[in-house]
Amino acid sequence: MKRFRLKLEGSLQQVDVFEKPKLLLEQYPTRPHIAAHMLYTIHTTFDDIERKLVADLGCGCGVLSIGAALLNAGLCVGFDIDEDALEIFNKNAEEFELANVDMIQCDVCSSTDGKLTKAFDTVIMNPPFGTKHNKGMDMIFLKTALDMATTAVYSLHKTTTREHIQKKANEFKVKMEVIAELRYDLPASYKFHKRESVDIKVDFIRFSFK
């Protein structure tokens, strides 16, 4: 099983990421190691990927979508507001020759007029952490994801916000389960970053309907 996860991680290392990430959108790529860990767990422990309709919110360059497709999702649709990110995602999908991946450019935090309500089995995401210019954005992403999913939402959130997120989960009337505590290796991507990288403690969380 470990070999299977490492093989997935090796594949995801081939996914191209941002050359010029946009600060306002908190564009930090999901590391292949973390993406593989997330997807492997979702697939093997909960059986929420294979033959399922999967949405990837704030998909960026598509590492989670591509990973889900490699694990035989029925279809994985990535949603992102940034045209440049989706252009990289599209090139990645073409290089992997995946037929079960699609992408939509839109603002997932604005109203979708109910068109995507309960349209997916599973939603996966690495949302903005809701810091700096995007305060509260993580919870807007979560609310949107819960509206779209019929079974479960899988997401990464800063461990320091766990108590707040638990309150929100209670408010949204969903079950929250911290599957793993991870260290997110955040590379220096912007001019204001003083160190080459910094480790942030993050929770890998499953939200499911009671």
Image (cartoon, rainbow, N blue to C red):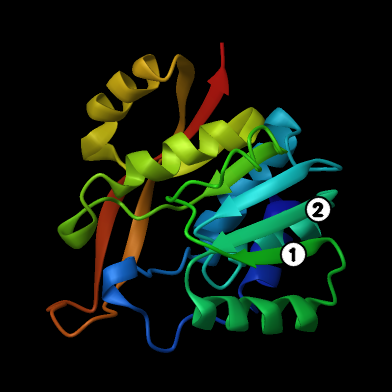
Is residue 104 visible in the rendered image? The answer is: yes
Residue 140 sits above or below residue 164 on the image = below
Residue at figure coordinates x 74%, y 54% from the top left: 76
- What is the three-letter code of the residue carrying label 1? Asp
Q: For mark 2, what is the residue?
A: 75
Q: For mark 1, what is the residue?
A: 102
- What is the three-letter code of the residue carrying label 2? Leu
Q: Earlier in the sequence, mark 2 or mark 1?
A: 2
Q: Are marks 2 and 1 in contact (CB under 8 Å)?
A: yes
Q: Nearer the viewer, residue 183 or 151?
A: 151
Q: Is residue 21 left or right of residue 85?
A: left
Q: Secondary structure at mark 2?
A: strand
Q: Nearer the viewer, residue 17 or 172?
A: 172
Residue at the far bottom in the pictured view: 19
Q: Nearer the viewer, residue 113 or 46?
A: 113
Residue at figure coordinates x 69%, y 84% from the top left: 91
Q: Nearer the viewer, residue 156 or 149?
A: 149
Q: Position of residue 162 (x, y in %)?
A: 28, 30
Q: Secondary structure at mark 1?
A: strand
- In the image, which disc is placed on residue 20? none
Q: Position of residue 92 (x, y in %)?
A: 69, 79
Residue at figure coordinates x 35%, y 17% from the top left: 171
Residue 53 sits above or below residue 192 on the image = above
Residue at the far top in the pictured view: 210
